[in-house]
Every structure is written in structure tokens, then in C-alpha cells.
């Protein structure tokens, strides 16, 4: 009888201790905003590229293309406009990585002129004027200057520099992204859009470890998140060709405009498809 009472007392004491411990953990920590901990993307490393020998590359072509982030297929790269629960747009991710020193920004697409963090910030701080009524005379407007720093929502386009090549060792037409450039809208002092410019280039292989640890919205399944590295690897985006390597070193918009430029961009894409298709017999 005494043993039974002692067992009951010990059981109650254990339950009270466990409840108090759980209660203290809940009070001292933030509630989990999901059913399970999503750690697959955050703990990933980028898949290494297959080694390529010069002797195995029998054909190659360098391509420059543009991603318009306003297109439906590219919207996961543009949103969210503000970081939410660790999720951020591609432009915001690249910018934060450059400012923190995890990525190197380059002034040119050949990656020969690196930029310091202070140069990146200075080159992307816009001065905007706002008229306000003067305190001395309400009928006269005074001009105040507002210094607006980088906003990811102003990046509407992204340039990619890629190499397409045929590897005879693997019998595969493959591609490698070499560089990425953010194209930011430029505004006048009055806040009117006046054009767009490339703010810097980054070396894509250097960015892959960062891209592999940040997920991007999957429109088909929330349980199967893709990383930004997966998105580029699978080419889950829509792009328009701006230039193919040529003897004149000229861009498509230098010799074609409007519909002709779009048709020329599609011709370059179609040539890549036909090259691979013609390698095989059916």
C-alpha cells in the first residue's frame, strides 16, 4: 500500500515537472509558425558541376539573355517585395549578400574590376526632391532632399551571361551561367522614371552556395520548395536573348528593333534547339 502511494506521488511529481518544463519552453521561445521544421533547403549545398575538359567540348556558344521579372513565370524571383520570415526576392538576396561581404560585386561583366561595399552603396543611393510649403511664406515651396537607398522592387530585370556547349564525353548539350547583373530603374530628382541601368555584376559560381540555402516560392507545391540554385539549374524561368557571340560584338537591338528583335531572339533559341536535335537520328 505504501509503495502504491509512493508511486502515485512520484508520477504526479514527474507530470508537474514535465508540464512546468514545457510551459517554460513555450513562454521563453517563439511559437513555431508551421507544422514541421523546414530545414532541407537551409542545410543544402549546391550540386557540383560535372568536370569539363577542353578536349570534350566540341561546340560552344556564349549567350546573353534577360529575365523580365514582371512576366508570370518569373514572379517568384520578384516577390516578396519585403523580406518575410526569411524569404526574400532574388534582388534582395543578392544585394544583402554583397553588402555583408559574402559576395563580390564587379563593375564589368568580365569580373576584372571589383567594387567595394561603400562604392556599391554610393552608386545606388538616389537623391529625390520634395517641395514643401515654406514656414516663412506658405505660398513659396521649399525643396527638401531625400536620399533613398536601394529598393529591390526597383529591380525589374536581370541579365544573365551563359555558356552553352556540347560535351561529347556525356553526349549532352549543357549550359553554365557565368554572371548575373541586376538592372535597376533610374528616377529623376522629381521621382519620374528615366531609364534603367546595371548596378553591378556577380560571379554566379560564387553565389551558388548562397542561392542553395534560400528557397523560392513553388507555385505547385508548398511542401517541395526549390532553392534559387535549383531554379537556375532547372531553368525554371522565362528569358529573352539579348546577344549571341558574334564577329561584330553587337547586341540584337543594335541591328533589329521591335518585332524583328523578338524574332531574332527566338531564332537564336531555335538554333540551340536544332543543334542538339540534329545530333541524333530517330
Image (cartoon, rainbow, N blue to C red):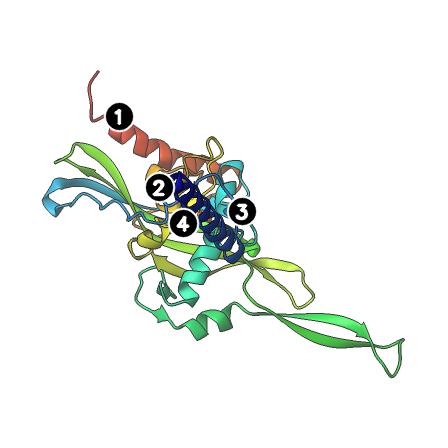
Q: Quadrant of the N terminus?
A: top left
Residue that mark 4 sits on: 214
Q: Name the residue tied to disc 3.
A: 79
Near-viewer residue (68 or 1): 1
Q: Is residue 169 left or right of residue 32?
A: left
Residue 54 horizontal/vertical position (percent) = 13, 47
Residue located farthest toward the front when viewing the structure as drawn: 1
Q: CA distance from mark 1 to mark 4?
A: 35 Å
Q: Residue at x 53, y 37 (%)?
A: 72
Residue 177 location (% of width, % of height): 31, 48
Q: CA distance from mark 1 to mark 3?
A: 36 Å
Q: Are the residues tagged 4 and 3 within 8 Å (C-beta)?
A: no
Looking at the image, is mark 1 or mark 3 nearer the viewer?
3
Query: Which element carries disc 1, helix, strand or loop?
Result: helix
Give the foreground label among 1 and 2. 2
Check disc 3 and report its element: helix, strand or loop: loop
Label 4 or label 3, whichever comes before in sequence order? 3
Residue corresponding to mark 2: 230
Residue drawn at the location 70% of the way across and 71% of the way down? 129
Q: Identify which residue is drawn at 39% across, 42% down.
A: 2
Label 1 environment density (alpha carbons within 10 Å; few <14, some 14–19, many ≥20)? few
- Gap in Å between the C-alphas at discs 1 and 2? 25 Å
Observer-nearest residue: 135 or 169?
A: 135
Q: Quadrant of residue 190?
A: bottom right
Q: CA distance from mark 4 to mark 2?
A: 10 Å
Query: Of the residues under marks 3 and 2, which one precedes in the sequence?
Result: 3
**Can residue 265 be seen in this snapshot?**
yes
Amino acid at each position: 500500500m505504501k509503495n502504491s502511494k509512493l508511486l502515485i506521488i512520484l508520477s504526479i511529481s514527474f507530470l508537474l515537472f514535465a508540464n512546468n518544463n514545457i510551459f517554460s519552453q513555450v513562454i521563453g521561445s517563439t511559437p513555431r509558425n508551421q507544422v514541421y521544421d523546414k530545414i532541407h533547403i537551409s542545410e543544402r549545398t549546391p550540386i557540383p558541376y560535372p568536370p569539363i575538359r577542353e578536349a570534350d567540348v566540341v561546340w560552344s556558344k556564349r549567350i546573353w539573355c534577360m529575365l523580365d521579372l514582371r512576366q508570370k513565370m518569373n514572379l517568384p524571383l520578384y516577390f516578396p517585395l519585403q523580406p518575410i520570415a526569411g524569404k526574400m526576392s532574388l534582388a534582395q538576396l543578392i544585394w544583402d549578400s554583397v553588402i555583408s561581404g559574402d559576395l563580390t560585386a564587379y563593375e564589368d561583366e568580365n569580373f576584372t574590376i571589383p567594387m567595394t561595399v561603400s562604392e556599391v552603396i554610393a552608386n545606388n543611393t538616389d537623391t529625390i526632391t520634395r517641395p514643401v510649403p515654406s514656414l516663412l511664406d506658405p505660398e513659396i515651396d521649399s525643396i527638401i532632399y531625400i536620399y533613398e537607398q536601394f529598393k529591390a522592387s526597383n529591380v525589374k530585370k536581370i541579365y544573365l551571361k551563359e555558356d552553352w556547349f556540347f560535351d561529347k564525353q556525356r553526349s549532352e548539350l549543357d549550359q553554365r551561367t557565368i554572371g548575373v547583373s541586376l538592372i535597376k530603374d533610374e528616377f529623376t530628382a522629381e521621382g519620374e522614371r528615366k531609364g534603367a541601368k546595371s548596378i553591378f555584376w556577380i560571379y554566379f559560381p560564387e553565389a551558388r552556395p548562397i542561392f542553395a540555402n534560400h528557397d523560392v516560392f513553388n507555385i505547385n507545391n508548398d511542401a517541395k520548395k526549390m532553392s534559387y540554385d535549383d531554379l537556375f539549374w532547372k531553368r525554371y524561368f522565362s528569358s529573352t536573348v539579348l546577344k549571341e557571340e558574334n564577329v561584330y560584338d553587337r547586341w540584337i537591338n543594335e541591328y533589329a528593333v521591335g518585332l524583328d528583335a523578338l524574332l531574332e531572339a527566338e531564332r537564336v533559341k531555335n538554333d540551340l534547339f536544332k543543334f542538339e536535335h540534329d545530333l541524333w537520328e530517330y
